[in-house]
Image: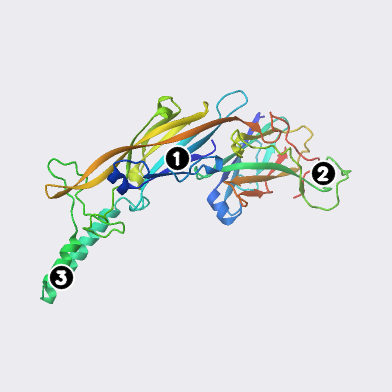
């Protein structure tokens, strides 16, 4: 088992801002998992992981002079979708709406008082209590420069414990 | 690395040649206002370089700077470099066609000849002792031939060197690079920046402008070397984990993943 899996997020920032979407080929995700990840090169990447592995996300901007940074990665919690390992189902609201798990809200303010998401390293250890065979989808939010329309997100990528 | 910096230096060539100084005749612009560059669009640009280091103290960011000179009132740098030559050839062709049609009509009036003469434009030529750079015609900014000394197109300013404290203190390592790019003559200046030592560091840019002067009844391009200054502000912050805000931890997975 590899100790570390890298997920690279390639973004065409100009395309994404013009379309106001990370779809239409404006974003491509690739990982180096050796366990057979699915949908490589698309926004629907399912990365195969094993507990104890460190997963790291790195953004790459296709145009090197346009800032592209990861604003947030939030795993999406489901409503009563009983998994094979958990038949009882926890007492979650019955509505199937997807609510992101509230993150700690790490601030990215640099020493000059400016927001700089390049300060953040997006990596974490795959926990041992992760249910195998079920994709854990996450919301990947990307910040492209600044302003009210600068943050775009996709909900389609996932981690899956083999 | 956050991104590569583009630093555009816009020169008021005509004024700079008149006053023999770049003071008040440059406009600096970079793409890092978002991260705290100050004085963007003015002569007092302070380019921010937001460096980062990992928690073990090792440097995480090495910034790259790219300088691109441009001139006010010149043909934009984004047109191909053979633009002038093409325009010149087209102008020659037009003049020859008009001459031919004049002789077809049989009447060569003095007025139309004068008009054609005017159209031919002036040719700055290399004189025996001069350092003229071109024997091309004088073209205005739209690519038309001109004999008006005020309307012609100055050659693009050339960066010849980058010096100063930022270089001598080994904060940045500038170098000139070649590329097959038709823009900027295929040459440009870039530098990498050591972001491990925060502070404000000045640097001097050496610029060569070209002035058209009349010598022995000929027009000659002469080079004029001038300098201008700008600075880099380097900051350096520790990297933190985006999930925990501090060190490495478990991924914040929900008890039940979203369906789909």
Residue most toward the top? B56
Q: Is residue B84 above or below residue B133?
A: below
Residue B246 versus residue A124: which sits nearer the camera? B246
In-image side of A157 versus B49 (left or right): right
In which chain is the residue bearing label 2?
Answer: A
In-image side of A153 versus B222 (left or right): right
Q: Is residue B181 above or below residue B86?
A: above
In which chain is the residue bearing label 3?
Answer: B
Residue B87 visible in image: yes
Q: Which residue is mark 2?
A: A83
Residue A70 location, quadrant: top right
SS class, disc 1: loop
Residues flagged by tags 2 and 3 on a common chain? no
Marks 3 and 1, Cα distance to the nearest angstrom?
A: 52 Å
Residue B53, x across and y down, in percent: 58, 28
Which residue is pictured at 66% across the width and 49% down the height? Answer: A154
Q: Which mark is residue B112?
A: 3
Residue B61 visible in image: no
Residue B168 location, quadrant: top left
Which numbered mark, 2 or 3, is in the foreground of this view? Answer: 3
Badge 3 local density, few (<14 within 10 Å), some, or many (20+)? some
Residue B153, x across and y down, in percent: 28, 53
Residues flagged by tags 2 and 1 on a common chain? no
Badge 1 local density, few (<14 within 10 Å), some, or many (20+)? some
Residue B255 versus residue B95: which sits nearer the camera? B95
What kind of colouring is applied to the model shown? Answer: rainbow
Marks 2 and 1, Cα distance to the nearest angstrom?
A: 61 Å
Q: Which residue is mark 1?
A: B44
């Amino acid at each position: 088992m590899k100790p570390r899996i890298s997920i690279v997020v390639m973004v065409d920032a100009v395309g994404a801002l013009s379309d106001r979407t990370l779809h239409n080929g404006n974003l491509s995700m690739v990982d180096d998992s050796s366990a057979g990840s699915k949908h490589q090169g698309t926004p629907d990447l399912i990365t195969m992981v094993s507990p104890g592995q460190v997963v790291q996300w790195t953004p790459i901007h296709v145009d090197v002079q346009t800032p592209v940074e990861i604003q947030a990665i939030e795993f999406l919690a489901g409503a009563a979708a009983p998994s094979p390992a958990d038949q009882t189902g926890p007492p979650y609201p019955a509505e199937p709406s997807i609510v992101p798990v509230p993150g700690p809200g790490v601030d990215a303010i640099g020493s000059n008082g400016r927001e700089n998401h390049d300060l953040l390293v997006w990596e974490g250890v795959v926990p041992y209590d992760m249910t195998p065979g079920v994709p854990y989808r996450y919301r990947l939010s990307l910040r492209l420069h600044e302003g009210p329309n600068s943050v775009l997100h996709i909900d389609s990528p996932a981690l899956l414990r083999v | 690395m956050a991104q590569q910096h583009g630093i555009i230096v816009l020169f008021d060539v005509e004024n700079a040649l008149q006053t023999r100084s770049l003071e008040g005749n440059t406009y600096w612009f970079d793409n890092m206002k978002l991260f705290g560059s100050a004085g963007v669009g003015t002569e007092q640009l302070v380019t921010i370089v937001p460096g980062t280091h990992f928690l073990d103290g090792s440097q995480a960011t090495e910034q790259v700077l790219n300088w691109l000179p441009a001139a006010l009132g010149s043909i934009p740098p984004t047109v191909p470099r053979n633009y002038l030559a093409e325009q010149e050839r087209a102008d020659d062709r037009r003049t020859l066609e008009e001459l031919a049609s004049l002789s077809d009509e049989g009447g060569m009036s003095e007025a139309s000849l004068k008009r054609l003469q005017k159209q031919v434009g002036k040719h700055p030529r290399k004189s025996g002792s001069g350092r003229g750079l071109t024997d091309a015609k004088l073209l205005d900014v739209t690519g038309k031939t001109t004999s008006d000394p005020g309307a012609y197109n100055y050659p693009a300013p050339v960066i010849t060197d980058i010096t100063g404290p930022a270089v001598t203190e080994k904060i940045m390592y500038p170098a000139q690079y070649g590329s097959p790019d038709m823009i900027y003559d295929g040459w440009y200046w870039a530098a990498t920046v050591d972001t491990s030592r925060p502070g404000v560091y000045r640097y001097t840019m050496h610029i060569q402008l070209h002035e058209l002067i009349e010598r022995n009844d000929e027009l000659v391009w002469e080079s004029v070397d001038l300098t201008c200054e700008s600075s880099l502000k380097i900051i350096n912050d520790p990297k933190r984990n985006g999930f925990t805000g501090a060190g490495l931890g478990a991924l914040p997975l929900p008890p039940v993943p979203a369906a789909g």
